[in-house]
Amino acid sequence: MNKLDFISIAQTPSDMLRHLLDAAIKLKAQRQKNGANAPIAAGRVLVMIFEKPSLRTRVSFETAMVHLGGAAIYLSPQEIGLGQRETVADAARVLSGFCDAIMARTFAHQTIVDLARYSNKPVINGLSDHSHPCQAMADLMTIEEHFGKLAGLTLAYVGDGNNVARSLMLACSRFDMKFNIATPPGYELPETQDPASAAAALATHDPQQAVRGADIIYTDTWVSMGQEAEKESRRALFQPYQVNSALMAQAPAHAIVMHCLPAYRGLEITEDVIDAPRSLVFQQAENRMHFQKGLLAAQLANF
């Protein structure tokens, strides 16, 4: 079997995306029923490369490997220095001799592309400046759990046209969902500005327009890692895009709220909305572990 890299939604066939969702659902149900998963990855090791810190990414991947009977090794920026102490190609070749899979959370997307090119073991994109495929797939898992389906639903993303928005847009297109996006002028997803692209059902600068008729209202931080110098200017510009009770009033009563975390309460989302019964924020955070467990099981145990 060829190695199964998970670099982006765009590079993964639709049938494989469905398979990975189903694997995650089965393993989650197995653990809930039996209190444990079968150790199908016993003796297998995941190496986790971090250029950016993360609560959810590290703990979810590490826990997933433990549940599957394997182990995970954390490498901080100081320990590996990709492209500084040694080339990405050399690091990929060395790690391929030590481990069974590599997960990387990086700034540049090209770093992950190069890791996959030179590694003979599966490589996972734990986040890059271009995409966040594990997040998007865990989100779809959460949506399907709640609504019992994906096809025909509409997800409205409000905020910055970033890596999470891109992955969600592509994931929605693969599962016959509509994707609306509202961003300030100048912060659009480049893909939505291409007349040849039909990935977004609606791309607008009006958040109220985006959420009308939507089943899922989604937002993310206005200031991602590496954008700290823009914090004050972004805060003023994005204020009209806050997900608050007034905006939620424009959406259907059944609409749910999602946020990939960390959340800056009182900025992109208000306290009353993120903690409301309509919020699935912490369910989607937990599902990061379950989806990644399904992904690792497929990569390491042909699950």
Image (cartoon, rainbow, N blue to C red):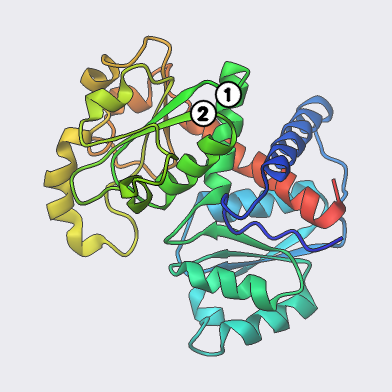
Q: Is residue 281 above or below residue 302?
A: above
Q: Residue at x 77, y 36 (%)?
A: 27
On residue 151, the disc is 1
On residue 177, the disc is 2
Q: Nearer the viewer, residue 203 or 49?
A: 203
Q: Which of 301 and 79 is in front in this view?
A: 301
Q: Which residue is drawn at 76% across and 38% down?
A: 23
| Mark pair 1, 2: CA separation | 5 Å
The image quadrant of residue 49 is bottom right
Q: Nearer the viewer, residue 213 or 66?
A: 213
* Badge 2 amino acid: Met
* Badge 1 amino acid: Ala
- Is residue 162 toward the left or the right of residue 80 in the image? left
Q: Residue at x 38, y 24 (%)?
A: 275
- Is residue 91 toward the left or the right of residue 129 in the image? right
CB under 8 Å between discs 1 and 2: yes
Q: Can residue 285 be seen in this view?
A: no
Quadrant position of the N terminus in the picture: bottom right
Q: What number of labels is visible?
A: 2
| Sequence-earlier tag: 1 or 2 | 1
Q: Position of residue 144 (x, y in %)?
A: 60, 25
Q: Where is residue 130 in the image (x, y as percent from the top left)?
A: 44, 59
Q: Where is residue 125 in the image (x, y as percent from the top left)?
A: 58, 59
Q: Can residue 229 be seen in this view?
A: yes
Label 1 secondary element: loop
Label 2 secondary element: loop
- Is residue 244 toward the left or the right of residue 290 in the image? left
